[in-house]
Amino acid sequence: MLKIPEVKFGYSANQSNVDPNAMGDWLEACALFDGPDVTKGDVIDMLLEYQICSDENQDLAHLIAEEGWEEVSKRKRWGGLPDHVDITVNRISSQGNWRDDPIRSFFVLLSALRIYPDWAKDFQAYSVQGDLFERIVEVICPHLLPGWIAYRAGWSPDDTKNIPEIVGELVNRLYVPGAADLDRWLLNAGNDGGLDMICYRSFGGEREAMPLFFLQCASGKNWRDKIHTPNPNLWQKFLDSAVLPSTGIVAPFVIDDKELRIAALIGQIVVFDRIRLLSAARDGDVQLDDGFRDEVIDWLQPRIDGLPRVT
């Protein structure tokens, strides 16, 4: 078993102070990286041993464990867990090796970084992590939006694009004229304007006014700070486009329904979280090519090996 998470598992005296979403991430990580089985009895024992609940309050420990089971069951029902993850009343079983599903393993590991912040300090590599995430999203996007074309527009360690360069590329792809005086709208040309991925539906003709999604890929715990980027009004000005782009944020985390709804309202965005990404990847039988698959596994291996485990 992995150790009790360092955050969001607060001492619970009369009611649960354990976040169900964090509990779900912990249970998924335990089954996937340290399984194949996690039992409800083991979880209850750990809640008591780590003094999340007192020995005199075993009923509350049972309730917290049950909330975790409900969270994982919901994730499977919504398409975020594969068929080989079996959930019974008292057991979660994950058959196979985490290497067999590097996309899901990558997403679950990124969620573990959030609940083990002290452990994560030794394994942070934000630029590499973000680059891998965007490349995975690029592979999934055509299945997330069937019939659409996905193009990775933003900055990467190997391709440090800026707004004028991105505009130049999109002018050709989207058949838009581009701003006659781009400098008039630029505060800082040396970044990518928060645009990581563009998805568009081409109809074959060389005409503009096609459906557009401009996406921000957020692989870190600060994803909430990015719900207003990219700004659709600015990008419409940059491109001199007839269409105001729809915008969205893509994250490797399971975002609970209330937060997803509020983030969508505040940012006026579509939220693609882990559930939606993995469901689309499974429906489309998405596979990483061998070289990229090995790259993801090589990044994951030392982090999974170093996860905080009960000794």
Image: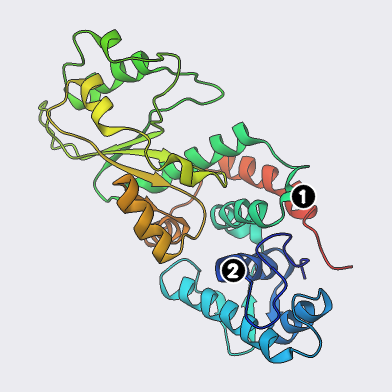
Q: Secondary structure at mark 2?
A: loop
Q: Position of residue 188 (x, y in %)?
A: 41, 15
Is 139 situated left or right of 306 in this image?
left
Quadrant location of the C terminus in the rendered image: bottom right
> Which of pointers 2 and 1 lies earlier in the amino acid sequence?
2
Instruction: Answer above or below: position of 308 versus 15.
Output: above
Q: Looking at this view, is 133 or 260 the one in front?
A: 260
**Residue displayed at 72% across by 79% down:** 43
Q: Position of residue 242 (x, y in %)?
A: 12, 28
Is 299 situated left or right of 144 in this image?
right
Q: Residue furthest right?
A: 311
Instruction: Answer above or below: position of 237 versus 279.
Output: above
Is 255 situated left or right of 201 in this image?
right
Mark 1 crowdedness (10 Å alpha carbons): few <14, some 14-19, many ≥20: few
Instruction: Answer above or below: position of 10 versus 298.
Output: below
Question: Which quadrant of the view contains residue 67?
Answer: bottom right
Mark 2 crowdedness (10 Å alpha carbons): few <14, some 14-19, many ≥20: some
Q: Secondary structure at mark 1?
A: helix
**Residue displayed at 41% across by 48% down:** 140
Q: Looking at this view, is 100 or 131 the one in front?
A: 131
Residue 144 visible to the viewer: no
Query: Which amino acid does the dot numbered 1 rest on?
Result: Asp
Residue 46 visible to the viewer: yes
Q: Which residue is mark 1?
A: 118
Query: Which amino acid does the dot numbered 2 rest on?
Result: Asp
Q: Which residue is mark 2?
A: 19
**Residue displayed at 70% across by 68% down:** 10
Q: Looking at this view, is 26 or 234 the one in front?
A: 234
Is 235 situated left or right of 254 in this image?
left
